[in-house]
Image (spheres, rainbow, N blue to C red):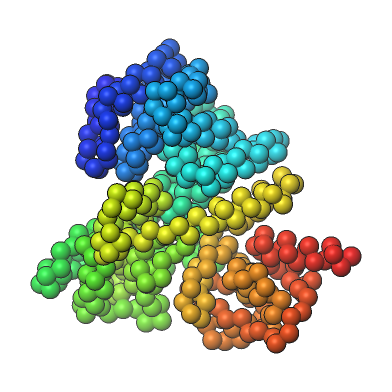
Amino acid sequence: MSEQKFTELIEEMSNNDIKYDEKKLVKAWELTKLAHVGQVRFSGEPYYEHPLEVATILASWKLDEDSIIAGLLHDTIEDGGAKSEDLVREFGENVAHLVDGVSKVATIRWKKDAQAQFVENLRKMLLFMARDIRVVIIKLADRLHNMRTLWAVPAAKRPRIAMETLEIYAPLAERLGMGEVSGELNDLSFQYLYPEEYKNLVRESKPYYKAAEEHIKKMQHSLLRFLADEGIKAKINGRAKRFYSLWKKLARNEIAGDFTKIHDIVALRIIVDSVTSCYAALGIVHGHFKPVPHIGISDFIAQPKPNGYQSIHTKVFGPGGRIVEVQIRTRVMHEQAEYGVAAHWAYTQAKAAGTSDKILESKGVKVEETKLNWVKQLVEWQKELTDSKEFLEAVKFDAFRERNFVFSPKGDVYDLPAESTPVDFAFAVHTDLPEYIQSAKVNGRMVPLNYKLKSGDVVEIIKSKNKKPLNRDWSRFVVTSMAKRRINKQLRKGE
């Protein structure tokens, strides 16, 4: 069985055009089996099947050969008695570095009585992220397989593993643009942490999913015909909303548990070959299905989200007047939306191999180094935030909290935690701007400085002519760590 899975790993790499040396892969597989000989998982399977599954997940994300080999070997130092120098000799420094990095971040454990140790390991993970993002991608693949097999772990251990997944790994995957991975981790955690709520939601939502899917199918057939008539090649599929995401949305005050108020329980996704075809498809959709007034179009192709997500979202009246969300993107954008920074890495490699920017951009690829600026920012904060509690708060609020995407009047996108205010926005724009704040406008209207921003808001800071000290009252409502730290630092100086 295991040898068949290893053959399938090689096939996955071939299918995804990943360059590899088969002899090197076989050598890594043999070392994995040797390092874990006699070790068994809670499921009763030989332990080495786990790293093989991790490597297969990485191949499905189109990671490079070194990452996949590191996936096979990721537990050989910590659990298998292998030495780093052995890995350097057999597989090169790059693989050894990745395995060492994964081993060092492998001990993150969410325990209330051991917060300092947890934070220390979280610090390590962020440092490795800044140096080589692949370390954390391998760790996410490791966590994904562990969550898929959590049923075999003793019941007493499951809530702790599910909680650290929900609190750290799922939001981290989301922050890295890995929407599919984040969604699966959230759903897996949900069913172990809130089993009754999960069962009730699955039961109650069934008729709504069924009705939405039938509605979407009618629209799907019509749209395929309309697009083909205009010469646009497209794939159209339905995307069912994940259970955890649905549960959170139902809990909102404006929804109050009413399924009929959720228009994206199943959304239509149109996948085309080029950016030009995306906009042509949008015109065809609106030509046959009227857009919903006041909701508008979200164009994340022209203005990508800071985590790299690109797509056009629109809501239209489908057959029978039912509101349907339609998402339009290229195939490459779709891969990046599903696997985020992992897909980004693959296309960065394509660029390094000589593929021109023009070819990549025509497919919707924007290879931007700024995507991971937030990681570098957190690493910088580590030098200042020595207190474990303060650092954990900074990470959870600024990195892993629910995000809003707001715009400057020039169209620049800013990624802020939920409940951020115009003052938080000013700190994100420029370190000096808060010292010139006079007032603020959101969507062209004057608002108080403690106004809670929402995704899609356009924020304008009205500047005073002269610089002035930061207002101590702002500390009562700002939420970003940068704003809190700067204001508190000034207050301490004043004292």
Instruction: Describe residue 444's horizontal placement relative to residue 236 as left or right.
Output: right
Nearer to me, 267 or 458: 458
Camera-side residue of 454 and 35: 35
Residue 112 position (above or below residue 312): above
Quadrant of the drawing holding the N terminus: top left
Q: Position of residue 447 (x, y in %)?
A: 63, 82
Q: Where on the picture, by quarter, is residue 90?
A: top left
Compared across the picture, whether 245 is left or right of 400 comes to left
Return the x and y of residue 327 as percentages of the image width and height: 31, 65
> Which quarter of the figure has residue 63?
top left
Image position of 345 (left or right of 464): left
Please, is residue 184 above or below residue 457 in the view?
Answer: above
* 71 relative to 453, above or below: above
Q: Could you say where residue 172 lies in the image, as x and y percent from the top left?
A: 51, 49
Residue 54 in sight here: no
- Position of residue 152 measured from the top left corner of the image (x, y, whole percent): 45, 27
